Amino acid sequence: MSANILSQIKGLRKVRWLNLNGLVTCVTAGLSKPPCTSISLLGRGGYNTVPHADEEDFVPAIKHSEIATMFFVRNSGLYPEIPVPQVYSWGLTFTNNAGAHQLKDGFLWGLDTMSPTEQLSVVKGLAKLQASLSKPVPFDQIGSLTRNNDGSFVVGELVTTGALVGGPYKTRQVLHALEEWHSLETEQLSQFELEPRATPQQFSQLLQLLSALIPYFIPPPSYTPLVLHHPDISLRNILFDPEDHSKMVGVIDWEGAHILPLMLTAQFPGDLNSVHYDPCTRPAYPAENWRAVPHDWTCFGDTSKWPTVYKSKNEPVDLRIRARAMIKRYYLRQCFSASYAEQMAEMHQDHNLARATLFADAPYYLKFHEVLTGRWMGWIIHESWIKETYWRLRVLDPMPGVVVIGPNTYRGSAQELACDLNICEPDERTEREESDCNS
């Protein structure tokens, strides 16, 4: 290894689990080219400088699926508009010279920041990327891509970021949570303090409600074509041309990509999302804590009820600055939705009016999907939403198959229409918590 390379390695920020000398050796062997002459840090995303997990938590099948997806996007001919780095070689063990599993691809320079004047063009570029991925795939199952020994692509077990969920599936199922309950020796599934408290009675009721709701959350035919879903479209995973900030030259981090019905892929890019607690919670807007559906900030509301936050002892923070950014994201999301519809018509000659409003119609289907794939904790965390959705549909009594839409968050309740005779019974969870404290 040359003295120049050794000097560059010495100057790089060190990561305790990564052997940079070994990484250079792996790259040189994988590319089958003359010795590496330079090494530098191009940048890092929110989570990935180099993908890494403790060895006992690392699941090779997840990385295999990511690699297969990159090959599929690059070579299938379905996505000529999506630039994916060339995969030259990979290693999925911790016994290689680098000391970590690694994926060597042809990185291109991207942007770390962008000016406000570029926001609109970038949002339109993100919408074009989303529309490109909305082309139907030649598969008939829900799951993640993998490859056979002959190199052909098939749909395998459903992979989310960091976990295998089972499958492949023809439809969505509620079996995952059942598997976690059927062999319990106590009435509590919760094993840790931060996990929600849950009883078999709660679980049984939610199972009944979710089973009843499934027919209402089967997307109408316009939204059911199976397409490829990138789970983390965000600026940290997109490389831009430094001369033209609206031009994408690379899309990375395909871990957790999977085949889903079109309706369930309608998630806004991470940079356009907003949550209920940023910059602060508002009493009139309940927190529903969804990962896939943004919390809509459309106005300040009563700022007199906002908390006072200090940057230092005598320097209060103006939360309205951050709130304005959240409100701006709301309108950028509307621009993204409109641009997506334009790109669908331009790229795929798709003038279907239902798909033109995909992002407006998808939130409740995304919420329901998040509940079903969230295992037992997802059921308990969203217990109020499940019950309220059930009662509102029960009151309206629509025919299954119509599009289900609703407010960003529930601020009222239809459950008051039910006569719940449990009102006189003691709260089992409260009694159990008191018993735990006394013991």
Image: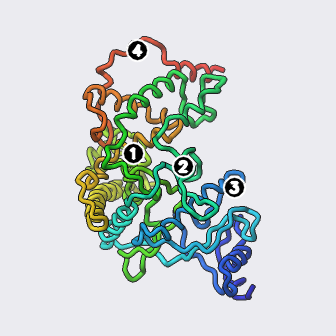
Report the Cα–Cα distance between label 4 and label 1. 32 Å
Q: Which residue is mark 2?
A: 158
Report the Cα–Cα distance between label 1 and label 2. 17 Å
Q: Which residue is mark 1?
A: 366
Identified at 33% across, 49% down, the residue is 223
Nearer mark to the viewer, of 2 and 4:
2
Report the Cα–Cα distance between label 2 and label 4. 41 Å
Which numbered disc flags the more N-terminal residue, 2 or 4?
2
Which numbered disc flags the more N-terminal residue, 3 or 2?
3
Q: Is residue 428 above or below residue 196?
A: above
Report the Cα–Cα distance between label 1 and label 3. 31 Å
> Considering the image in quadrants, where does the C terminus appear?
top right
Visible residue check, residue 312: no
Which numbered disc flags the more N-terminal residue, 1 or 2?
2
Q: Which residue is mark 3?
A: 54
365 lies left or right of 163: left
Tag shown at residue 423: 4
Q: Nearer the viewer, residue 398 or 171?
A: 171
Which structural element holds mark 1? Answer: helix
Q: Position of residue 332 (x, y in %)?
A: 30, 60
Quarter of the view holding residue 216: top left
Decide: few, some or many residues near mark 2? Use Cα within 10 Å; few <14, some 14-19, many ≥20: many
